[in-house]
Image: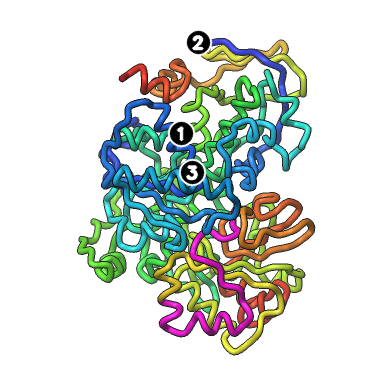
Amino acid sequence: MATLSERILGAPAGEYVDRPVDRAYVHDGTGVLTLEAWRALGSGTIACPGRDYVLFDHIVPANTSTTADLQHELRGFAIGAGMHFSDIGTGICHQLMGEGIALPGEIIVGADSHTCTLGAFGAFATGVGATDMAVIWASGSTWFQVPRTIGIFLSGRLRGYAEAKDLALTYVSRLGMDGASYRALEFIGEGVAHLSMDSRMTLCNLAVETGAKTGLCYADAVTVEYLESFGKIVEPQAPPACRYEQELDIDLEEIVPVIAVPPRVDTISPVSSLSGTPLDQVFVGTCTNGRNEDLLRFASIVRGKKVRVRTIVAPASRKVLEDAARTGILAEILSAGCTVVPPGCGPCLGAHMGVIGKGEVCLSTANRNFRNRMGVGGEIYLSSVSTAAASALAGEIALPGGEE
Amino acid sequence: MRLEGRAVCLPADIDTDLIIAGRYLRTKDRSIWAARAFEDLDPSLAGKIRGSVIIAGKNFGCGSSREQAAVALKEAGVVCIIAPSFARIFFRNAINLGLPLAQADLPCRDGDLVVVDFSAGTVTLGETTTKIPPLSPKMLEILAAGGLVEHWRKRG
């Protein structure tokens, strides 16, 4: 009667365990400090380079010579050490790991807080810092405290323009920014079966915004089919049969488009209550909402129309961009007047590719609206892709499908 | 282990973007992180925290996994951080760097003397002594070694 985290980590909640990790990844942002810490260890060994991934996504392509120097050093190290390396333009680390690499039942660590995204595959996936990662490079393992679990029961199915993002913001607001500290979230119930893998990744992506260690979905027929498209044959996981520390029921039929108002992810309002809020920029992308399903949804709303505010679209990976090019979605997005930037994190963390200015307001599909995150003195509202698309067309916050 | 310093009070939910902004991450120069710590909260704060004990509200260090946040505070000379709760990645990062954290919900007045005694499991603020929950044995080991790198090197 164990939770999925307990099954994967092989011990009951509360226990401290040392476990080998199946996959470990860093990006250009956290990899630099990881490399410094690894060198300080002085051991000179990489335990399992075949399990290590270095994926450039944060500042791609490099914006300054300092960034270029740091990336040059890390790139050379990763390739020399025999780690998996993906260079600029390939995509966001969590998305790439979600394109047929992360598998059900695995233990995955990433030097990025949104590593929890990969819980969508029924893996135990969690973020660590640079020094922890350095020891993982050297030893192939790390310690975990097996988390207690909050069960989030999903019933029904999403209606109208409501998306997994609206569902995610809703559960974050119900739990609060530290409501699931050190816990795991398990998304269960018949409602999960109706969610695509793209949607499940969105759902698990926001788990860390409640303080959770990770968010997990059990691998089912949807997972199996998705991974099969990447040539990975897996079995569904036995469904949940456990008691949860806490339970939360969410009826998907009741989810409506919502927005997280600055500067907190857990403070949400229905889009309708914010309609007309002026915008300076709309940003669609990130590890939350830059996938195929998202670009398709965005294009279906802006198709044949023109955006009335500067709009930046960042596909989550090259594969997503290629798919959008092949299906014609990319051309529609460009024709609508959007600026498409290289696959990667884009301006989400305020480093480049769409940093906002003092007093500017951005509606973003990302996962954090902390003060000054996208630029000093700017404000960030977080929404779904459909809300972002409708708002881009209106030049102000607007409800997808029009006011009710 | 016994530490002391003057209190610097901070609110709840201090995120890692506030501790060190994303625009300062592209460097290996730790003095930059120390100088820019809390810049978006209060630009004068970085100059005031050397030798201090930060007493914050709940969920300190939430958000990004950026270890630069913990590095910034250590380099800026923060002696210890006390909060009712910490975000888990920040917690691990701080301990891994040898920056002590204590869990307690304390009333804070800037400048008060704070004494943290990890051996006794207490925090003393002015006249009041409060019990703090012990760190896990693993974390104590890492902290005692001065951080995870030193812990690893000692272990061989």
What's the residue at 50%, 61% (across, down)?
A: A344
In this figure, which residue is indicated by the disc labeled 3?
A30
Alpha carbon separation for disc pair 1 and 3: 10 Å
**Secondary structure state at the residue bearing disc 1:** helix
What's the residue at 56%, 12% (across, down)?
A: B117
Q: Position of residue A172 (x, y in %)?
A: 55, 54
- Residue type, mark 2 in image: Ser
In this figure, which residue is indicated by the disc labeled 2?
B119
Can residue A164 be seen by looking at this rendering?
Answer: no
Of tags 1 and 2, the one toward the viewer is 1
Q: Is residue A373 found left or right of A324 in the rendered image?
A: right
Of tags 1 and 3, the one toward the viewer is 1
Q: Position of residue B39 (x, y in %)?
A: 72, 39
Badge 3 local density, few (<14 within 10 Å), some, or many (20+)? many
- Residue type, mark 1 in image: Glu
Q: Which of A296/A319 is in front?
A: A319
Q: Position of residue A48 (x, y in %)?
A: 26, 41
Residues tagged by mark 3 and mark 2 found on one chain of the structure: no
What is the magenta range?
A323-349
Please give the chain letter of the residue carrying mark 3: A
- Residue type, mark 3 in image: Thr
Of tags 3 and 2, the one toward the viewer is 3
In this figure, which residue is indicated by the disc labeled 1?
A36
Above or below residue A180? Residue A172 is below
Q: Is residue B92 magenta?
A: no
